[in-house]
Amino acid sequence: MFASPHPRLAAHVLSYTAQDYRQHERRVWRTTPLGVLTLSVDFESPVRRLESGVVLPASAVIGLRDRPMVAEELPGRSRGISVGLTPLGAYALFGLPLREIANSVVSVTDLLGARGRRLTEELAEARGWAARFRLLDERLGAWLGAGLDAPVLGAWQRLQHTGGRVRIDRLAGEIGWTRQHLNRRFREQIGLGLKTAGRIARLSRAAVLMTGPRPLAEIAAVTGYADQAHLNRDFRALTGCTPTEYRRKW
């Protein structure tokens, strides 16, 4: 079940997703870097672990990534809510530079402490998903504090709106910072470099177009790749699969 956060949270929170299912067999899932941080609040969860064998915490935050993450989920019941956060929302909510959780999975209680434990308890006790979504609106609305530096936020938004098709030196010039200073502040607060964030924005736009019938060569052209081979290389590097394999899943 999906729900949209209250409009006042639109710059910070992208989506709410409720899940309640029982997994009868081991399954493998892949997280790709699409410019979103995920906050998961688990009421019940099966064991989930990375390919390395590291067990993932229940109720976790997945930071921004510049590479795919593959994990396995063992049989068991999964019940909880996932919250999609923008970098602005994550920076405001957790109050730390996002470079500290980039390419990582961190326990919610490590980031939110007692607030995280209380939120999990309150959501689990609420009657129905609609009540849980309203509770998230209230709690997140109260907790979201200071945001990203305005130039960093502006750079992120420009990269998203253009699908990564803006030169970094031009972006720095528009903001009024040197390229080096902008990239340093951007990496500290967002967790990724400007060039990587641009690649992910371009890939995100291409992935959206792949849900339709357009040929891959045309998608490559309209999203700023040099050619289809460039699209294939970047897609595999960032997601771990080819565009054709990704398309089959849709």
Image (cartoon, rainbow, N blue to C red):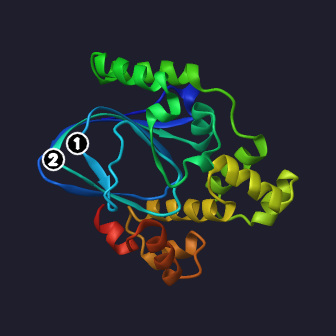
The reply, left or right, for residue 59 in relation to residue 198 is left
Q: Total label count?
A: 2
Residue at 51% x, 74% y is 234
Q: Residues within 10 Å of mark 2 (few under 14, many from 20)?
A: some
Q: Amino acid at mark 1?
A: Pro
Q: Nearer the viewer, residue 240 or 107?
A: 107
Q: Is 7 left or right of 75, judged from the image as shown?
A: right
Q: Which residue is mark 1?
A: 46
Q: Which residue is mark 2?
A: 75
Do the numbered discs 1 and 2 sit on residues whose CB atoms are within 8 Å? yes
User: In the rendered view, would you say 24 is above or below 121?
Assistant: below
The residue lying toward the viewer, choosing from 168 and 101, is: 101
Label 1, secondary structure: give it: loop
Amino acid type of the residue that numbered disc 2 sits on in the rendered structure: Pro
Residue 21 in view here = yes
Vertical comparison of 180 with 104: above or below: below
- Image coordinates for residue 102, horizontal then vertical, percent: 55, 52
The x, y position of residue 133, in whole percent, is: 39, 24
Residue shown at 36%/42% (left/top)?
57
Above or below residue 118? Residue 46 is below
